[in-house]
Amino acid sequence: MTAAESFDVIGFDADDTLWHSEDSFAKAEATFAEWVSPYAADGVDVKAALTAVERKNLHTFGYGVKAFGLSAVEAAITITEGRVPTSVIAQLVELVRADLTAPVRLLPHVPEVLAAVGRSYRMVLITKGDLIHQTFKVETSGLAHHFEHVEILLEKDPEAYRKVLAGRGIAPARFCMVGNSVRSDILPVMALGGTAVHVPYPLLWELEHVEHDEHFAELASIADLPAWLGL
């Protein structure tokens, strides 16, 4: 059986799989450090402290730009013991606002790959994060028409994927997920008996790193997906 005959549905992640995302967060973290460091005590690793606050807040704030903004404000106040001026807090809020309204920047080859895969497969988009922002990105990306269903999750774990697949009548063994995060896109699907294809992005958020010993397909670019599927 060829890969093309093995699957009924192909799932795609969104952020850093179809369009750029993490580079904006990396830039925002660097800006945070630049603005907050002058008010922090000597020797404080400002970026590490921000990540620690994000980790603490993950199950309360979730993922995305708004969650980053809330954690950034909290971290700025905590790191500086309240010395950070309100003008810096206001700048952080505006930084978040700019990221929330920034246009989607598609990764290379994405439109033609989706068109090619869509001629042979049903396709779904499964992403996680803030509902409003993720919906905005999907609707303005120009890609929504490729997918029969879009799912925006609070978390990507086996149970979340199980519910999505069951709700669409998709057998896990006939499902293949394509994404950049091993933690969120690969391991949970494999845990259900599905197939996953890893397409790394040059940057990966620290909280998405995971230790594993699983073996799975990895492609250098999403442009290689049609050939991997045998199309």
Image: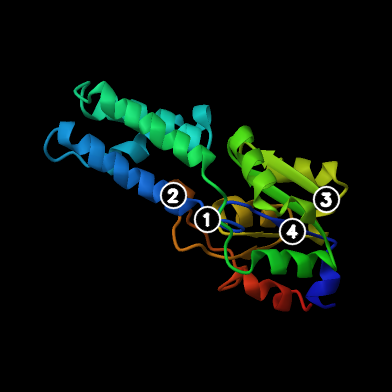
- The three-letter code of the residue at mark 1 reads His
State the colouring used for the structure image.
rainbow
Which percent across, then down, holds residue 152?
68, 40
Label 2 to label 3: alpha-carbon separation: 28 Å
Q: Residue at the location (71% across, 69% down)? A: 112
- The three-letter code of the residue at mark 3 reads Glu
Which percent across, then down, holds residue 185?
62, 54
**Which residue in the structure is indicated by mark 3?**
148
Q: Residue at the location (62% across, 33% down)? A: 132
Report the mark closest to the observer, 1 or 4. Answer: 1
**Which residue in the structure is indicated by mark 2?**
24
Q: Residue 20 carries which label?
A: 1
Sequence-wise, the earlier of marks 1 and 4 is: 1
* Residue 182 falls left or right of residue 4: left
* Residue 12 falls left or right of residue 22: right
Label 1 to label 3: alpha-carbon separation: 22 Å
* Residue 76 falls left or right of residue 10: left
**Which residue in the structure is indicated by mark 4?**
194
Quarter holding residue 18: bottom right
